[in-house]
Amino acid sequence: MAAFQAQKASVEVEDTQMHLVANAIETVKRDNEILTANYAEAMRNGDYETGARITAALSKNEEDLRRLESGHLKMQEEARNKPPVPPQPQQALKPKQMIENIMSQVSKPSAQWLKSNRDHFKDQTDITDMFNAHESAVKRGIEPDTDDYFRFIEKRLGIDANDQGESPMSSASKPAARQAPPPSAPVNRDGGRKNVGWLTPAQAETAKSLGMTDKEYYNNLMALQKEGRITH
């Protein structure tokens, strides 16, 4: 960046100098036109002294004009042969900016993992280590975006899993396992173990509210089902 700014400043100085020389040439030419007109007027009036001074001024201006035009041509030639100014180099991104860019290009689980662990990436070396760890995991047949994958990356980078907050693949982020309903209340229909029926907790609560025993409620339920008045 410093080299670019120095070269750019040098080119700007040269452009300014060329512009000044071009203006000086135009000024001398205008002065010569005025002096020539004044010389003619002095000769018409027989003012030879003034004519002599004008002749000396014209001679000096012609010498200055030749020097200016020669220098201007040389500056133009040097400018044509000079290599062009290279494009301005991009500013290096900071590690956190690089992580943000990576997050926008990876899968949602990987983006979440990066978001949770962004503070562990202090410089370009840390980011390079992460990519190397990814390549190593893939070569070992570890599928990306899995628990094993993230654990492998964390181990390689020396990240403490307890320090990183909730992982995108942690148990808290997985669907909760469906809980089994509470057991139903058993009802012995005939006193034998082979004839045991079951009431759901709601049915047992209903029986209790009606002042019936579980067995009485169950027998009535079976009778209604047998008559076809209820289906279950």
Image (cartoon, grey):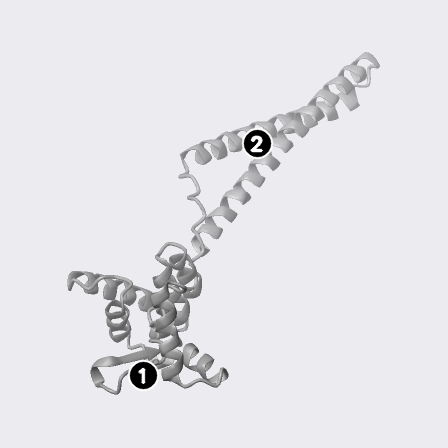
Question: What amino acid type is highlighted by mark number 1?
Answer: Pro
Of circles 2 and 1, the one toward us is 1
Label 2, residues with CA under 10 Å away: few <14, some 14-19, many ≥20: some
The residue where tag 1 is placed is 186
The residue where tag 2 is placed is 68
Label 2 close to label 1 by CB (< 8 Å): no
Q: Secondary structure at mark 1?
A: strand
The quadrant the N terminus occupies is bottom left
In the rendered image, the vertical position of residue 157 relative to residue 72, given as above or below: below
On the image, the x and y values in percent for residue 62 come to: 62, 25
On the image, the x and y values in percent for residue 66 come to: 56, 27
Most extreme residue toward the right is 45
Choose top left, top right, bottom left or bottom right for residue 152: bottom left
Q: Nearer the viewer, residue 163 or 62?
A: 163
Report how far apart the C-alphas of labels 2 and 1 lie in the structure. 116 Å
On the image, the x and y values in percent for residue 81 come to: 40, 34
**Residue drawn at point x = 41 percent, y = 64 percent:** 229
Question: What amino acid type is highlighted by mark number 2?
Answer: Leu
